[in-house]
Amino acid sequence: MIPRYSRPEMTKIWEPANKFNIWFQIEAHACDALAQLGVIPKESAAAVWANGDKPYTDERIARIDEIELETKHDMIAFLTELAEHVGEESRFVHQGMTSSDVLDTCLAVQMMQAADILLDNLDELLAALKVRAEETKHMACIGRSHGIHAEPTTMGLKFARFYAEFARGKERLQAARKDIATCAISGAVGTFANIDPLVEEYVAEKLGLTPEPVSTQVIPRDRHAYYFATLGVIASSMENIATEIRHLQRTEVREAQEYFAPGQKGSSAMPHKRNPILTENLTGMARIVRMAVTPALENVALWHERDISHSSVERMIGPDTTITLNFALKRLIGTVSKLVLYPDNMMDQLNNFGGIHDAQRVLLFLTQNDVSREAAYKIVQRNAMLVWKSFGIDPDNPNSTPELNDIEKGATEHDNRLFYFLSHDEELKAALDVKDLQRLLDEDSISYHTKRVDVIFKRVFG
């Protein structure tokens, strides 16, 4: 992954120095187990640690690369370089093992290390979302479905929804981390023909892994698929909140806005621009993480006991997805924490269309007053359409400016145009006393729609 979207803590996991160090740990622990079983001398196992346990410097890594140019085999190059340090006792290294025993076990450790960082990121994000949810618990705004005004909600509920979603993502990643944390030290086709299963158990314990029940020559790739699919879901949740912010920042909405730092520029051509560049960037990075999911799923089907069609895929998607998601989550944490909100604009948006957000409330009131649901729906819908018309939007003739009659013109003087039209509807007046409807709508509309917020918060935050 390019440096622009990388953070040092995650990139270190995938650097050669960490990889070769894990390879060494696997081989050295295996030697200890073999020594305990009496397969190799204890002195030889001790010599591996004493002479080989040295930092993988640039010089050592360059030497391994040099050997690989000749051998065309990364594991043999590693073992050859290790032998140059260990000496004669190196003949006992890799006893009864195959390359995948080391490669797959190492990949499991690296994926665990990456998951631990990502889980820390999720904890930070959850904390930020909880703070914003509590701050905006009762900050009313219009809810939208299909992008169209629906009924009132609160910004706090938006943040609470994202909190619950990322909490599920954290649980999934914890499960995926557990699922991937397996060790394979079982030999050429996984039969333990040349190595005792106790070696695998010993190495697994030392590395915080569990033995793979049946490893053939590789750890089954359904585990890896689950891991990368989980990262893909988390990335989609990230895009979910990014998309919400991008829509709320639109000029004609402007209910929220990414923090715009002093000296920041929005456009090379238009000095007035303040663009949602962070959340647009997050949307793009979510695509990069998700693009690994299908190859990871396709890696599950390997030929017989193994082939290496999965190898090139994992060498790329392992680093790229975890590095990208780590960077993106940290960016999202900052975006959420610094997100600028405009509650006055939220109220303006909510009240801009003459009370039509109470349409369902009126519909239910009519059904509770002996009006059939079908009749009630027609009454409310036709009057809601008149509200639109009074704002210059004719649903039946969208390309023309509607002509208003005297009643329709009168609506323009009223804040609650829905009630105004309903109070002039003959069918409604025949069904109930308009004063009863007026008393209903005189109640605080916002409080009516948000009265269960505390119940939802208790479900989310306990």
Image (cartoon, rainbow, N blue to C red):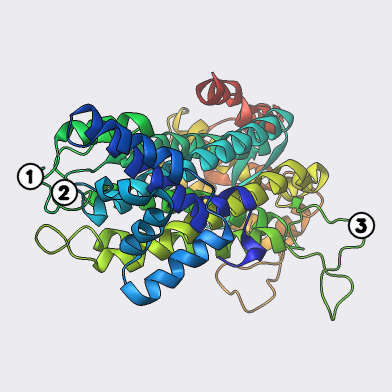
Identify which residue, 408 or 6, lies in the foreground. 6
Question: Residue at coordinates 42% horizontally, 41% vertically from top-left?
Answer: 112
Q: Position of residue 230 (x, y in %)?
A: 39, 47
Q: Position of residue 428 (x, y in %)?
A: 54, 40
Asked if the residue under mark 1 is in contact with the one under mark 2, i.e. CB atoms within 8 Å, the reply is yes
Tag 1: amino acid: Ala
Distance, label 3 to label 1, CA atoms, is 67 Å
Looking at the image, tell me whether mark 2 or mark 3 is earlier in sequence order.
2
Looking at the image, tell me whether mark 3 or mark 1 is earlier in sequence order.
1
Question: Residue at coordinates 51% horizontally, 47% vertically from top-left?
Answer: 379
Q: Which residue is mark 3?
A: 262
Displayed quadrant of residue 347:
top right
What is the secondary structure assignment of the residue under circle 3? loop
What is the secondary structure assignment of the residue under circle 1? loop
Distance, label 2 to label 3, CA atoms, is 60 Å
**What numbered label is drawn on residue 193?**
1
What is the secondary structure assignment of the residue under circle 2? loop
- Give the left or right position of residue 384, taking residue 408 as reference: left
Displayed quadrant of residue 324:
bottom right
Label 3 packing within 10 angstroms: few (<14), some (14-19), many (20+): few
